[in-house]
Image (cartoon, helix red, strand yellow):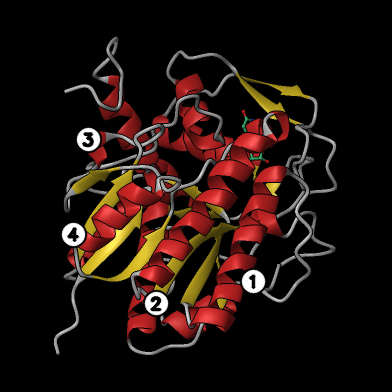
Amino acid sequence: MVESRDILVTGGAGYIGAHACKALAAAGFRPVAYDNLVYGHVKAVKWGPLERGDVLDRARLNAVLEAYDFAAVMHFAAFAYVGESVADPGKYYRNNVAGTLTLIEALRDHGIGKIVFSSTCATYGVPDHVPIAEDWPQRPINPYGATKLIAEQMISDFGRAHGLRSAVLRYFNAAGADSQGDIGECHEPETHLIPLALEAATGGPALTVFGNDYPTSDGTCVRDYIHVTDLAEAHVAALEKLLAGGESGALNLGTGNGVSVLEVLGSVERTSGRKVPFEFGPRRDGDPPVLVADSARSQRELGWSPRLSEIDQIVRSAWRWHVSEGAKKPAKNCDAP
Ligand code: UDP
């Protein structure tokens, strides 16, 4: 029997989900985006059908699972603002935990036994040292990270009980935009460093650098930035491994290179040829000083390695997207025609 190439992509209209849909289509799959469009954008769904629905809506999920013959699921649908998760944890536990439970129960009941899950380095909390390997203790320090850790545990328990096979992918800092300009980062509100720095460089509000007294080379936080297209390709590699009978496991997706906030601003200035106005402000709650992946396992197990994730490459792609979106001002809106 020929295996179906239909893949359910929850959150397929979001930033990372849409890049995954593009990579899936390039690999010969048919991505079916399932998205409630709260943060997702209709315009980002270009590589397969859009099924509007919420992961908490079991009846709607059942209908979509019955309408296609899914070989597997990629589960991105989640809320992902750390600060908001601290202020409104119920919203995060409901969507990220109850939503994942609703989804995996529906998968169990429809006999769909493979899932690629979008997790995060926020499940590790503040590491004792870096780089962080997959078997390090997971001690999240905010509700967002806690909800992703609980979801990981549920998926693993469903594996033991019901045979669900999973690739749990823990991302470090996803950034950048599609090289063909098809999709890019468009969050509302925007809280991420690179888009905010690009805004600041092009006449937007000055950036606040959160803290300059960290124990790092220049006093600012260090992160491991990975290009969203590299992330998307790793998802496809993980999916193909599961489809070929591979075992369940958790993998870090990062580059292993740490870049400080000031180094990111330097890259934005080089790329854009403009100054980034900024000031130093206090540390942001819940920000560990340094998060860098040990990426050896994912590279070994997936036969994958980042190819677009050097910081200047990431910023260049984000800059191109920013300039093309900026041209649509004043009606800058991800769903503008
Ligand atoms: N950051 C900053 N100013 C901002 C936004 C972010 O200094 O306006 C810093 C933040 O403290 C962190 C890094 O930039 O060290 C990356 O933050 P971002 O929100 O992009 O991703 P996160 O690490 O929270 O996933």
Element type at marker 2? loop
Quadrant of residue 170 in the image? bottom right
Tag of residue 294: 1
- The kind of residue tagged 2 is Gly
Residue in front for this viewpoint, 160 or 174: 160
Foreground disc of the pair 4, 1: 4
Residue 286 visible in the current orientation: yes
Residue at figure coordinates x 54%, y 24% from the top left: 276
Q: Earlier in the sequence, mark 1 or mark 3?
A: 3
Residue at figure coordinates x 50%, y 80% from the top left: 162
- The residue that mark 2 highlights is 113
Residue at figure coordinates x 31%, y 47% from the top left: 60
Estimate the x, y position of residue 56 in percent, counting from the top left.
Answer: 45, 46
Residue at figure coordinates x 47%, y 32% from the top left: 195
- Give the distance between the C-alpha atoms of the residues marked 4 and 3, in whole angstroms: 23 Å
Element type at marker 1? loop
Q: Earlier in the sequence, mark 4 or mark 1?
A: 4
Estimate the x, y position of residue 204 in percent, counting from the top left.
Answer: 48, 14
- Circle 1 residues within 10 Å: few <14, some 14–19, many ≥20: many
Tag of residue 67: 4
- The residue that mark 3 highlights is 43
